[in-house]
Image: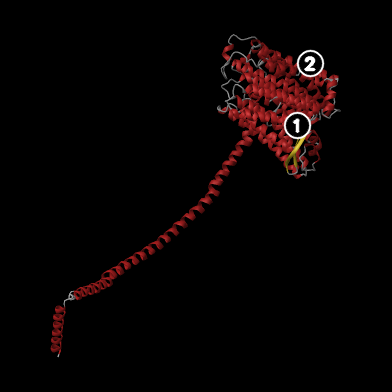
Amino acid sequence: MSAVIWLLISLPLGAGAVLGVTGTRCNRLVPALGVAVAVATLGVAVAASVTRPQSSAPLFAGMRAGLAVDGLSAFMVVTVAAVTTAVLAFAAGEFGPDENRGRLFGLMLVFSGAMLVTVTATTLPLLLMAWEVMGATSWALIGYWWRRPERVRAADTAFLTTRTADLGLYLAAGAAVAGGAGSLDLRALPDAPSPWLHVITGGVVVAALGKSAQLPFSFWLSRAMQGPSPVSALLHSATMVAAGAYLLLRLHPLLAATGWAGPLVAWTGAVTALFLGVVAVAQRDLKQLLAASTSSQLWFMVLAAGSGGIAAGTTQLVAHAATKSGLFLAAGAWLTALGTKHLPALRGAARTYRLLGTAFTVGALTLAGLPPLSLWAAKDEVLASAYAESAGLYAVGLAAAAVAAVYSIKALWYVTQPLPDDREAGYDTERDGTRRTARTTPAPLLVLTFAAAVLGVLALPGPASWLKRLVGAPDEPSPKPWEVGLSVGVAFAAAGLAWWWASRPAPVPRPAVRWARGWLHLERAAHTVVVRPVLRLARALAVFDDRVVDGAVRQVARGGLATARIAGRVDDGIDAAVRQTARGGLAGARLAGRVDDGGIDAAVDAVAAGARGLGRAARRPQTGLLHQYYAQAALGFAVLVLIVLLVR
C-alpha cells in the first residue's frame, strides 16, 4: 500500500524534472505528455484518498521522512491533482510551439509534486524540503518570461517576501530540536515544553501567513500576477497560497496548545479580509482584483484554523480552489484573445465569448457567496465556527462576505455590459490579441466551473457530518437557520448595491482610492521599513569592511612590502659585495693565470726546449762512423787541455 503514496509524489516530480530539461526539443509532445502525467497523478490521488496509504523512510540520524494520507490530506491530494490537470490542459492551447513548453509544464508538475509532499508530510524535515521546492519553482514560474526585467523583479519580490516568512519554519524546526522533539513528527509538536512550544508556534504562524499572502505579506501576491495566467491559476488558487492555510488547519492542535496563536491567526486574517477586500474593490485590472480577492478569501480558511473549524476550512479551501482557478483561466483566455485584462476594456467580453462569459459568471457569483453555489455554504460553515469562538469575529466575517460580493459583482458588471462602439481602442494594450480562444480552453474551464457550483454539497447537513468525522472534528458547530438567513441577506444586499453602484463614481476621496489601488502601499512600506535599512546597513558594513578590515589588511600588506623592499636592498648590498669579491677573485685568478702561464709554464717550457735542443745537438755527433768519433775525441781533449792551461 505504501507504494501508492510514493508513486503519488514521484510521478509528477520525476516527470516534471524530465520535461523541464527537454527545453524546446520536444515542444509538440510536451503538452500531451504533461497532461497525461497529470491525469495519471489524479488517478493515483483518488486511489490514495480511498486507501489512505502511509509510509516512512530514514532521513537523518534519529529522524524519518514520513508520508501519510489521512482524512484532511485526502481532500487536498485530489484537489491539487485535479486543478493541476485542468490548468495543464488549458495551458496546452495557450502556449504555442515558439514558447519553451518543456520548462513551463515541467516546472508546474514539479511544483504540484512538491505541494503533494507538503500536504502528505508527517514530519517537519520533509515538510521543509517540499516547502523549499515550492518556493523555488514558484519563483521560476512567476518569472517564466525572464527576458522581461519587470517580470523578473516581480518574481524576485514574491520569492524574497515568502522566503522571509519561510524562515519561521526553520525557527520552528530548531526550537523543536532544542525542545527535545527528536523525531520532528508534526503530531508531537504540541507536546513540546515551554518556552519552545511558543517559539515553534510563532515560527509556523509566520510561515503560514506569509505563504497565504496575509497581512503584512500580502503585496507579494500582487507582484506575482506578472506570471502567465495558468501559473496564477495553479499557484494562487489550490496550491501555493493554500499551503499556508492548510498548514494551519493541519497544526490546529499546536495553535490550541498555546492559547494565543488561534486568536492571533483569526484576527490577523480578519484584518486581511477587510483591507484586501477593499483593495479588490478598488482594482481596475482583472487579475489584480482576483489576486486581492484571494488574500481576502483565504481569511475564511485562516479563521477556520484559528477557531477550530477544520472541516469548514477544508470545504472552503476546496471550493475556493475550483472557483478561483476557473476565474484565473477565464481572465487568461480573455487576455490571450483581446490582449488586455483591464476591466473597462473588457466591457462586453462575456457577450463576445459566451462560453467564457458563462463560466466567469458562475465563478463570480460563487465568489460573491450567493446561494446555492459552493462558497455560500462553505462560508456559513466557517462563520458558524467563528461565532462559537467570538461574536466579533463573526461580525467581521459578515463584513468580509459583503465586501466579497461587492468586488465579485463589480468584475461581473464590467464583462457583461453591452459592447461599446470603440471597444477595439482598449484591446491589445498588453499583447497582440488573437481574437479567439484556444481549442483546449472550454473543457478545463467547464469542469472547474461545475466543481465551483456543486462543491457546496460538502456543507449540507449529511455530507458535512461525514466530513467532520473524516477530519477528526465531529463536534464542530453548524450554522443555525438565522445565521444562514442573515448571511444570505447580507450577500444579496451587497451584490445588489454593487451592481447598482458599478457605473457611478465611488464616494471615496481620491487619495483613499489610490491607496487601495496600490495595495495599501505595502510594498513601499516594506522597502521603507525593511529593504532600505538593510541596504543602508549593508553599505555601512561594506564601507567598514573596505576602510577598516580591508584597510588593516592593506596596511599590513604595505608594511610587508616595505620590509620586503628593505630586505631586498640589504640583499642587493650583500649581492654587490659578493659580486665585488667574486670580481676580485676573478682578477686574482686572472693574474695567477698570467703568472702561471707567462712565468712558471714559460720556464718549464724553456727548460724543456733547452733539453730538447741539447738532445738534438747531442744526437748530431752520433753518426756511427768511427773516424768521426775519433776526431770528436781529439777535439774534446784539445779543448780540455786548453781550459786547463787557461785556468792555471
Q: Nearer the viewer, residue 554 or 323?
A: 323
Looking at the image, the residue that sits furthest to the front is 626
Res 33 seen here: yes
Q: Amino acid at mark 1?
A: Ala
For residue 359, the mark is none
Q: Quadrant of residue 5?
A: top right
Q: Secondary structure at mark 1?
A: helix
In which quadrant of the rendered view does residue 28 lie? top right
> Who is closer to the viewer here, 640 or 108?
640
Asked if 451 appears above or below 641 in the picture, the reply is above
Q: Position of residue 546 (x, y in %)?
A: 53, 46
- Quadrant of residue 168 in the image? top right
Q: Which mark, by number, is residue 3?
A: 1
Q: Quadrant of the N terminus?
A: top right
- The location of residue 265, given as percent across then percent down, is 76, 32
Q: Position of residue 115 (x, y in %)?
A: 71, 30
